[in-house]
Image (spheres, rainbow, N blue to C red):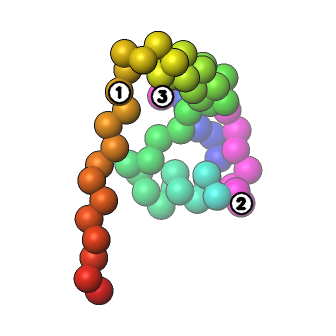
């Protein structure tokens, strides 16, 4: 399966039998990001968290009675 990174537009080949390929095939809302872009974003986010001026807002967990 050919996929394209949403950030850098690099085209890569994924094996059809891996989980990421199945997610992309079955759920078009899922997007693919190449490994260098993923690592770069993780590094930048970690640097911003260490400055103390960046807040990562997490959604409120709602308890389900069921």
Where does residue 41 sit, x and y in percent of width and height?
54, 23
In the rendered view, would you say 25 is above or below 11? below
**Which is in the foreground here, disc 1 or disc 3?**
1
Residue stretch in magenta: 6-18
User: Residue 33 sits in which quadrant?
Assistant: top right
Q: Secondary structure at mark 1?
A: loop
Residue 1 lies, in percent from the top left, at 65, 47
Check the image and report above or below for 58 versus 48: below
Mark 1 packing: few (<14 Cα in 10 Å), some, or many (20+)? few
Measured Cα–Cα span from mark 1 to mark 3: 25 Å
Q: Which mark is residue 6?
A: 3
Residue bearing the label numbered 1: 55
Q: In the figure, residue 55 lies in which quadrant?
A: top left
Numbered tag placed on residue 15 in the rendering:
none
At 70% from the left and 38% from the top, the residue drawn is: 13
* Magenta run includes residue 15: yes
Between 25 and 20, the one lying in front of the other is 20
- State the residue position of label 2: 17
Is 22 placed left or right of 14 in the picture? left
Residue 9 visible in the displayed image: no
Which comes sooner in the sequence, label 2 or label 3? 3
| Predominant SS along the magenta part | loop
Quadrant, the C terminus: bottom left
Residue found farthest to the front:
52
Between disc 1 and disc 3, whose residue precedes?
Answer: 3
Callout 3 secondary element: loop
């Amino acid at each position: 399966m050919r996929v394209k990174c949403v950030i850098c537009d690099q085209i890569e080949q994924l094996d059809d039998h891996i989980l990421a390929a199945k997610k992309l095939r079955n759920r078009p809302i899922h997007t693919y990001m190449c490994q260098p872009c993923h690592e770069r974003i993780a590094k930048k986010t970690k640097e911003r968290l260490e400055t103390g001026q960046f807040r990562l807002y997490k959604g409120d967990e709602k308890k389900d009675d069921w």
